[in-house]
Image (cartoon, rainbow, N blue to C red):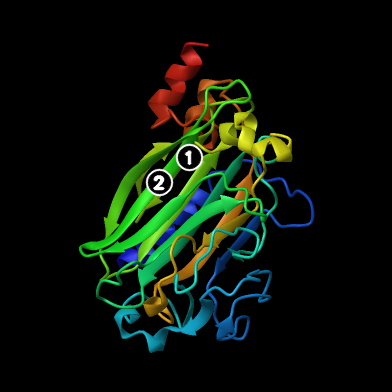
């Protein structure tokens, strides 16, 4: 079994951990995988294609994978989404947003999964090439963040979360962590798995790369809850329903028509059940279904129950 198929199986298992899935609003609880293939998608601007939105002048398009020989081994199919920071800005609302799933957050389904395949358009370093990807409410209110920076030795991935002890008004700390360095020779599976919990300072974000857990952190919940920058928004913690692909910082015109490729985007909002009420619920993989990030195996689940 090749790496891509093996990671697809792992991703399917992660997305299948939800015990209960509740549709909310008009969006479906599961979207994808979005493979950008014809006739559903056409080469050109992604804006307006099947729920995607990009109203700014950003270099983000559906492209023929055959135009990028370095991607020939990625198993992306015939088309993929390409993005570069040839034009970048500090804006949010006009950047690139995926179609929506039903909302996830403290006031909605309490779990969110997103995964996609990521690669480069060329096998060599693209100086200054940077993009970020975030679970978002569709208007620029991000609840997590990964940044991809093309550097000499590969694409460096950074995770940023936010801590803020409160009370309002309290400035937030944005905490950056290096997660991985990606080899340009292959495509890589990137995954967010987020548990939303009522109350402050308790959300959990897990970042998976190529099927392996690479980092565990928290969301940006307390930035919205306590930071005075969010006063105009009523310090409301947002629910998320889309993925934001953002080109910010300095524009790098030499990256025009190149940059990064994304394929196979999947998203799921779900409701995970609370703590176990019997040892039997921990068995046969049942431990995976509980909204408890400390459960690494069935024994952890049974131990938790025994101490209640």
Residue 69 % position (x, y): 32, 85
Where does label 1 land, which residue?
Answer: 205
What quarter of the picture does the N terminus occupy?
bottom left
Residue 217, numbered label: none
Residue farthest left in this picture: 153
- Name the residue rendered at 74%, 49% in the picture: 23
Residue 225 in percent (x, y) is at: 63, 31
- Residue 116 in picture, x, y percent from top left: 47, 62
Relative to 113, is 169 above or below?
above
Q: CA distance from mark 1 to mark 2?
A: 10 Å
Q: Is residue 97 left or right of residue 63?
A: right
Task: Give the structural element (helix, strand or loop) at label 2.
Answer: strand
Q: Is residue 124 left or right of residue 295?
A: left
In this rendered view, identify the residue nearer to me: 152 or 6.
152
Which residue in the structure is indicated by mark 2? 159
First reached walking from the N terminus: tag 1 or tag 2 = 2
| Along the line of sight, the residue nearer the viewer: 71 or 252 | 252
Classify residue 93 as left or right of residue 67. right
**Residue at the spot 36% in from the left edge and 84% down from the top edge:** 68
Query: At x 34% / y 54%, what residue is drawn?
Result: 157
In the picture, residue 58 is in which quadrant? bottom right
Question: On screen, 16 above or below 264?
Answer: above
Badge 1: residue crowd in 10 Å (few <14, some 14–19, many ≥20):
many
Nearer the viewer's eye, disc 1 or disc 2?
2
Labelled pair 1, 2 in contact (Cβ < 8 Å): yes
SS type, badge 1: strand
């Amino acid at each position: 079994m090749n790496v891509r198929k093996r990671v697809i199986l792992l991703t399917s298992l992660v997305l299948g951990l939800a015990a209960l899935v509740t549709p909310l609003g008009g969006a479906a609880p599961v979207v994808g995988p979005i493979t950008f293939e014809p006739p559903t998608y056409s080469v050109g601007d992604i804006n307006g294609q099947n729920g995607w939105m990009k109203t700014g002048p950003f270099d983000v398009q559906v492209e023929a994978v055959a135009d990028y020989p370095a991607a020939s081994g990625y198993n992306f199919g015939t088309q993929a989404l390409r993005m570069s920071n040839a034009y970048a800005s500090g804006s949010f609302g006009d950047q690139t947003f995926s179609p929506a799933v039903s909302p996830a957050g403290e006031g909605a389904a309490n779990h969110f999964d997103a995964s996609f395949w990521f690669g480069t358009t060329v096998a060599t370093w693209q100086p200054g090439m940077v993009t970020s990807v975030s679970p978002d409410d569709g208007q620029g209110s991000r609840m997590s963040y990964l940044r991809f920076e093309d550097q000499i030795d590969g694409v460096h991935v950074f995770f940023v979360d936010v801590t803020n002890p409160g009370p309002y008004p309290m400035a937030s700390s944005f905490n950056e962590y290096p997660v991985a360095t990606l080899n340009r020779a292959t495509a890589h599976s990137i995954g967010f798995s987020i548990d939303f919990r009522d109350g402050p300072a308790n959300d959990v974000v897990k970042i998976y790369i190529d099927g392996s857990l690479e980092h565990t952190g928290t969301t940006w919940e307390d930035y919205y809850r306590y930071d005075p920058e969010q006063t105009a928004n009523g310090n409301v913690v947002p629910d998320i329903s889309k993925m934001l692909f953002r080109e910010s910082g300095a524009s790098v015109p030499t990256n025009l028509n190149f940059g990064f490729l994304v394929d196979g985007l999947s998203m799921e909002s779900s409701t995970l059940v609370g703590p176990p009420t019997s040892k039997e619920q921990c068995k046969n993989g049942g431990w995976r279904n509980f909204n408890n990030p400390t459960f690494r195996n069935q024994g952890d689940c049974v131990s938790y129950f025994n101490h209640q």
